[in-house]
Amino acid sequence: MERVYEAKTDCSGCGTCARLCPQGAIAMQADEEGFLYPDIQQENCIDCGVCKVRCPFQQDGHFKEAGPARFYAARHRSREVLEQSSSGGAFTAVSDAVLRQGGVVYGADYDETFCVAHKRAETAAQRDRMRISKYVQSDLGETFIQVKADLQKGRKVLFSGTPCQAAGLRSFLQGSPLLPNLYVCDLICHSIPSPYIWEAYKTLLEKENTGKLTHVQFRSKKDGWSRANSNKGFLFSLDGETVLREDDRFYELFFKVKAITRPSCSSCRFTDVQRASDVTIADYWGIEKYQPEWFDSLGVSLVMVNSEQGAALLKQCREDLLFEERPAAESLQEQQRLSRPGALPPERERFWEDFRQFGLAYVLKNYVQK
Ligand code: SF4
C-alpha cells in the first residue's frame, strides 16, 4: 500500500490505521504544518488493505449512529463545576457517572509544556484537567490500545474527543464484544488548528512577556458565558504569577483568518446530526431566546443523546445534572457544524508561505491586526 489517503483533505490524523496495521508498518508523522499523517514503511507492508478499509473517513457510514439524536439543554447543579467548565458542566457529570462505577475516563489534557495529548483519568482530580476546551489537536498516542486494555479488564470506559477521534476508536474496536462497557463522547467541533502555530504562539508569548508559561486557559468565563465571548478569553500566566493576562490573537487566527485549520476539517464527514458517538456535548447557544429561564451566565450545555448507551449514561447523571429535552431545530439553527464543515480561506497558501518565511509575529500583524 502506497498511501492510506489520497489527499490531505481525506485524513484527520486519528491514527486508527497505525494502530490496526498488523505489521506495525505505519508511523504517524507531522507534516510542515504540524498535523499528523500516516506514513507507511513499504518494506514492512504486506498490502492487506486494513488501514484503508477501516479508515473512518473512507468507510461508508463513518461509524455513525443511525439516529435520530435527541437534544437536551443541561446544566450542572454545582456552581463551582460551572465555573470550572467551558459550558454547562455536562462533561463533568457524564465522566463522574463513569468514575463512580470504578470506570476510566480518557480526554485531552496538557503536558508540562502545554502540548495537548490524550490522558487517562481514574480520579476526579485527574479528570478535572480535561474539562476546559483546548483548541489544539490532541495526540492520541497509544490511547486506543489503553482503552481496549481497560475494557478487557472489565472496566467501564468513557472516551472523549473530536468526532473524527471518536469514529477512529469505533473503527479500532469494530465488532468487539467489549463495546457494552464503552461510552464514546464527542463534541461539536469547529475544526482543528495547527499544532505548529500553537507552538509558535506559546514561544511568542514567552518572548514578548519575558518568562516561562505556567498556565494557559482557553475560553475563560471572566466576562460570562455567551456566544459573543466564546472566541475570547484566552488567559495565560508566566513563572507562576497569580495575575492572569489575556491575549486573543490565537482565537483571531483560528476563528477569523481560518488559515491554520487542518485541511481535512474542510471536508469533515462528521458535521452531521448523526454522530459516531453515544453522546455529543457542546454549548447550548441561543438558549436565552428559546427558553430564557434556562439561561445562566456560567453556561448551559447542549447534550445530544445519539444511542441507547448514551441515553443510559445521561440517566445516570440525574443527581448532578439538570436537563430538559429540547427541539432539534434550535441547535440545528445555532450550530453550523451540525450541518456543514467550514471552508478553507483562499489565502491559506499565502499565509503559510508568510509564516514559514517571516514567522508568527509577522502573520499576526498582517493577517490579524490589519
Ligand atoms: Fe499495514 Fe496492511 Fe496498511 Fe500495509 S496495507 S500499511 S500492512 S494495514
Image (cartoon, helix red, strand yellow):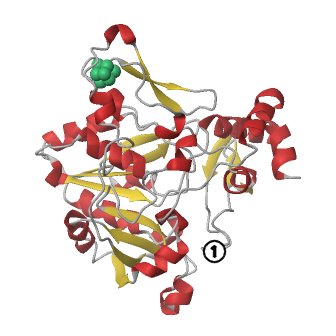
Residue 192 in the image, given as x and y percentages of width and height: 56, 47
Q: Residue at x 63, y 32 (%)?
A: 33
Q: Say which quarter of the image contains residue 246.
A: bottom right
Q: How dense is the environment of label 1, judged by Cα within 10 Å: few (below 14), some, or many (20 and up)?
A: some
- Amino acid found under the numbered disc labelled 1: Gly
Residue 62 in the image, given as x and y percentages of width and height: 33, 49
Relative to 208, 23 lies left or right: left
Judge whether 364 appears above or below 233 on screen: above
| Placement of the N terminus among the 4 image quadrants | top left
Query: Is label 1 within 8 A of ligand 1 (CB to nearest ligand atom)?
Result: no
Relative to 194, 363 lies left or right: right
Residue 50 in the image, given as x and y percentages of width and height: 27, 28
Q: Residue at x 44, y 59 (%)?
A: 187
Q: Residue at x 81, y 27 (%)?
A: 357
As helix, strand or loop, the secondary structure at mark 1 comes to loop
Residue 66 visible in the displayed image: yes
Q: Where does label 1 land, which residue?
A: 224
Q: Say which quarter of the image contains residue 231.
A: bottom right
Q: Residue at x 63, y 66 (%)?
A: 230
Ligand 1 appears in which quadrant?
top left
Relative to 68, 13 lies left or right: right
